[in-house]
Amino acid sequence: MQRTTDPLASLLAGKVRYALVTGPALFTLDEVRGKPERGDADALVPVGFDTLHLLTRPDAGSEVWGAETRIGVGPDEDITARTAGFVESGMEAARATLVSTEADGLAAFRAQAAEVRDGAMDGLLIMAETGHPLIAELLADGLQLAAIDGWETQGNRLAFPFLQPVTIPAATYPGQSVPLASVGSQVVLAAARPDPTDAVGVVGPGSAAIGQNLPIAAGTVARLRDALDVTVRLDPSLPTSMIAFEPPAERREGIGLSPAGSLVNLGAIIALVLIIRLSLSKPRNGARQPRA
């Protein structure tokens, strides 16, 4: 297991087979059109849900995230920074200066929280599961939570479907007396998308030693779901392959999605359909034969 600020980079570099990432990590932002584009990894299994938290000083005004404000987003390649970029692209009112840091991990957010308390920045964003201890810690140190409003009213459910409007319930954190609007996304186990040229482009002696993003079998995904005791469905807006959608339990281990296997399955299905149609067709004399 590797712990890193940017697990997606390790995944795409072939250093790991799977990575835990939040939905926005599977997309890149087209800076010209302001729209998300599918990245180079696929979601396999949902394992959790992260919510974007906005922390401010108690004396902050209503325009915490606006054109004249500076908002901390933690490490540059962290999921918080990526999510904040999507939110800014989707909300005209959210045009703050997003400030990242070269520090890593929780220390980066603690350092930027100190800057918010000192007045050097207006707010701090943290993408984390609801109830995360770091949020409670920073609230105890003098910050407060603020709402992220207006996401659903600007058509962003269609433009950025992987970012869902959510509510942080009242009393989720000490001192939080009212529910707060925000956005969130599924946390998933992801795998790099196979390069279609690998099927024919890596051959010959020694080819087995060449790192490749090999396809993930459907049975493997089913076993991952079972091992993780997954009961929720994968967000269909996330980039994925068909194997990520759980097949019926009685057929999990028997389904393969290789090209050859798919052709065999297709042939079997066609043959089965023909047999069923023949068995249901009327005999020439117009009388239907009785079933045994």
Image (cartoon, rainbow, N blue to C red):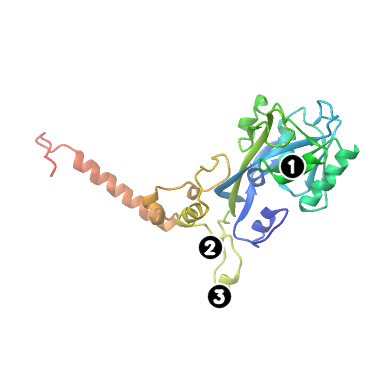
Name the residue carrying label 1.
135
Out of 102 and 176, give the one closest to the viewer. Answer: 176
Out of 37 and 99, give the one closest to the viewer. Answer: 99
Q: Within the image, what quadrant is residue 62 found in? A: top right
Query: In the drawing, does residue 267 fall left or right of residue 84?
Result: left
Q: What is the C-alpha distance between the residues marked 3 and 1?
A: 53 Å
**CB within 8 Å, label 3 to label 2:** no
Which type of secondary structure does the marked residue at label 1 adopt? Answer: helix
Q: Residue at x 61, y 31 (%)?
A: 158
Q: How many marks?
A: 3
What's the residue type where badge 2 is placed? Val
Q: Residue at x 70, y 26 (%)?
A: 150
**CB within 8 Å, label 2 to label 1:** no
Which type of secondary structure does the marked residue at label 3 adopt? Answer: loop
Question: In the rendered structure, which disc, 2 or 1, sits on the residue that comes first in sequence?
Answer: 1
- The answer to whether 171 is drawn above or below residue 102 in the figure is above
What's the residue type where badge 3 is placed? Pro
- The answer to whether 124 is drawn above or below residue 14 in the figure is above
Q: Position of residue 54 (x, y in %)?
A: 76, 36
Nearer the observer, disc 2 or disc 1? 1
Question: In the rendered structure, which disc, 3 or 2, sits on the residue that comes first in sequence?
Answer: 2
Q: Residue 200: which numbered mark, if any?
A: 2
What's the residue type where badge 1 is placed? Ile
Q: Quadrant of the N terminus?
A: bottom right
Which type of secondary structure does the marked residue at label 2 adopt? Answer: helix
In the rendered image, the residue lying farthest to the bottom is 205
Q: Within the image, what quadrant is residue 151 found in? A: top right
Q: Position of residue 291 (x, y in %)?
A: 14, 42
Q: Residue at x 68, y 58 (%)?
A: 10
Q: Residue at x 63, y 52 (%)?
A: 20
- Residue 254 visible: yes
Name the residue carrying label 3.
205
